[in-house]
Every structure is written in structure tokens, then in C-alpha cells.
Amino acid sequence: MEPVAVGASWLTRGVAVVLTGGLLGWGVEADGGLSPVDWFFLAWGLAFWAYLGSRLALARVGADASGVWIRGFLGVRRLAWDDVRGVEPGAWGVLEISRAHGDAVRAGAFVPPSLYRLVRRPVAVQRIADSLSLMARHPELRPKRAATGRELGPPLVLWALGALSLVAVDWLLVG
């Protein structure tokens, strides 16, 4: 069995693109009239907005022979199968992975279950949680090989840096 990877849907990627476009349309221009406090809140807001967009656009969770992997902001985190006890869907479209050692880990950014129920579609995050839980409990259902770097994908920071570089280019062209 091949490694399993589940990523962001077209809806969450669309929201991420809208957030990134919102960075450009925010209307704040880099000029000399901003106080240090204004710069602090501007930088914090842009960083948070870029982080949120990256979480929505590049969310990815998968499973391979060694365990569950979660694409994070700076890289990929792996949870060994021996450490995974179960996976439940969270209310806001995240997976909550309970562990044998340590606190639960939240992963992914999928469409919230309530939106799926509104349009009477099967809840995708529930299906993902069920598959990962079954793999954790039954070793014969797990993928047989390790995931490659291409399957794991890039860290989330790439989207955030791209969004922030668009703002920098906008400031340079306008300012």
C-alpha cells in the first residue's frame, strides 16, 4: 500500500488566496508617518494573516510506514504509530491526534464539519480521522513504504513568505 496524503481542499485554498489578496488590499502603505506602535501592530497583523493563509493553503496530513506525518510551519513532524492512540475530527476542521506520551496534537486545516452538513455532503475530516485511527489500531492496514519528500511537500513558511513578499513588492512599487 502506498503512503496516504490528504491536503487542503479547493475551498480552503480559495480562502487562503482571498486572505493573501486581502494583504494587498489592506490599504496600509509603508511611509514615514507611522509610529513604532503602528509598525508593531502592522507587522504582527501581516505575519498572522500570512500564517493563517499558509495553514489553509498548504495543510497536509498523511501516513506512511513509520507513522503519521503533519506538515508544519517550518517542516514536517512525524508521530510514530506506537505513539498514536486515535484520531478525532475537531469542530473547526482540524484533526486531533491523541498520543500515548504527551498532549494531543492538532493537525490540518480542513473544511469544518458543519459546512459539509449544510450542503449534505459526507464530512471529509471524519473520513480522514477514521482512516488514520484504523491504521493506528491495525498494523496490516498501514502503508508499506516511507513517504518521499515530494509526497510530504514544502513547509507552510513558503506560502507565508510568498504572501509577505507580495506586500513588500506592493510597498516598493507604490511607495
Image: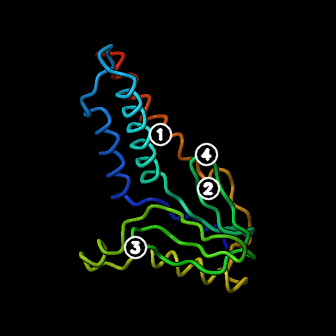
Q: Residue 160 carries which label?
A: 1
For image coordinates 38% across by 34% down, the residue present is: 41
In the rendered structure, which amino acid carries the disc numbered 1?
Answer: Ala
Q: Which mark is residue 150?
A: none
* In the foreground, 40 or 166: 40
Which of discs 2 and 1 lies nearer the camera? The answer is 1
* In the foreground, 28 or 54: 28
Which of discs 4 and 2 lies nearer the camera? The answer is 4
Give the quadrant of the N terminus.
Answer: bottom right
> Marks 4 and 2: CB-CB under 8 Å?
no
Residue 95: x and y in percent read 51, 70
In the rendered structure, which amino acid carries the disc numbered 2?
Answer: Glu
Disc 4 to disc 3, C-alpha distance: 25 Å
In the rendered structure, which amino acid carries the disc numbered 3?
Answer: Ala
Report which residue position mark 2 lands on: 151
Sequence-first tag of 4 and 3:
4
Which of discs 3 and 1 lies nearer the camera? The answer is 3
Q: Which mark is residue 91?
A: 3
| Image-based side of 153 in relation to 140, left or right | left
Sequence-first tag of 3 and 2:
3
For image coordinates 64% across by 53% down, the residue present is: 76
Q: Dot 3 lies on which element?
A: loop
Residue 147: x and y in percent read 68, 60
Is 55 drawn above or below residue 31 in the view shown? below
Report which residue position mark 4 lands on: 74
Give the quadrant of the C terminus.
Answer: top left
Sequence-first tag of 3 and 1:
3
For image coordinates 36% across by 69% down, the residue present is: 112
